[in-house]
Image (cartoon, rainbow, N blue to C red):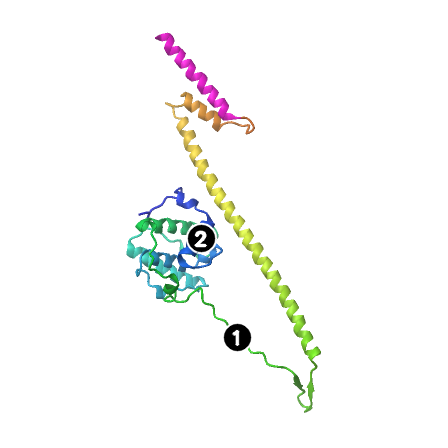
Amino acid sequence: MATSIGMMDGAYFVGRNEILTWINNRLHLNLSRIEEAASGAVQCQMMDMTYPGVVPMSKVNFDAKTEYDMIQNYKVLQEVFTKLKIPKRIEVNRLVKGRPLDNLEFLQWLKRYCESVNGGIMNENYNPVERRRKGGKDRSSKSLKSSKSLPVNALNISGSGETHTLSPNKACVPKQLRSNRGAGVANSTAEVQTLSKQVTDLKLSVEILEKERDFYFAKLRDIEILCQAAELENDPVSVAIKMILYAADANESALDEAQEYLNQTLNSVEAEEETEA
């Protein structure tokens, strides 16, 4: 069971889209951004699906918006981890900030862990929508407020006793202006949200690429240190590897040069052995 997963484990290279698809398919949700899972409710229900009945869903708030409400969800999750003896530290203060990379890393770990239990086989009798109804609030339900508009067709001038009836044209013009302004603001807001999402996605992509870069750089550094060891420093294979590592011009094929050097060295060794024989 994958309770302890190193940062260089393949689990941490699962993409954002795959994580979102995994969540949406299993919990019948429609998340479009990793930050939407920052409240901790999704994580609680994933554990509830993996270990039915262990999570007190009545304490899980799927409509948590404030950091205080989110922290309560993570307290429930931490209690579940403690009960199951899962040695995973939850970085609550970082997760509730809604930062994409922090939440992505935690969900990557969670996906790996859940898939390590019972071979990742999903409980067919588990109804995620029904279980959410037992929670504090269901994220799929939205309260709609209806407002009644009072018909304004007469204006009573106080003190005069006269009532002036407004013509339809005069009454409609201000509403049309407000409607146009409202539509313009709505369009601007939608554009800002779209651009913000694109910026967030680009930042997340950059962070993932930097993480991959650091991962492969660390591997190359380990190889370099090994080749610089005293007992291997002059070994033909080590020399050929260092020729590739230290190649300055990317336009030339360092691999071809290394292979040529290695072939010449090995041929020289074989020739010497035949002469001695």
Left or right of residue 172, residue 148 in this image: left
Question: What percent of the width, then of the height, locates residue 158?
Answer: 66, 88
Q: Secondary structure at mark 1?
A: loop
Q: Which residue is mark 2?
A: 21
Task: Please name the residue shown 43% across and 46% down the image.
Answer: 14
Mark 1 or 2, which is nearer the eye? 2
Question: From what the image shows, is residue 87 above or below residue 176?
Answer: above
Task: Please name the residue shown 40% across and 14% down the image.
Answer: 269
Q: Which mark is residue 146?
A: 1
What's the distance in space between the residues labelled 1 and 2, CA to CA? 34 Å
For marks 1 and 2 on the same chain, the one whose residue lies earlier in the sequence: 2
Query: Does residue 28 appear anywhere in the picture?
Result: yes
Q: Secondary structure at mark 2?
A: helix
Task: Please name the residue shown 43% across and 51% down the image.
Answer: 19
What's the amino acid at mark 1?
Ser
Query: Does residue 98 appear anywhere in the picture?
Result: no
What's the amino acid at mark 2?
Thr
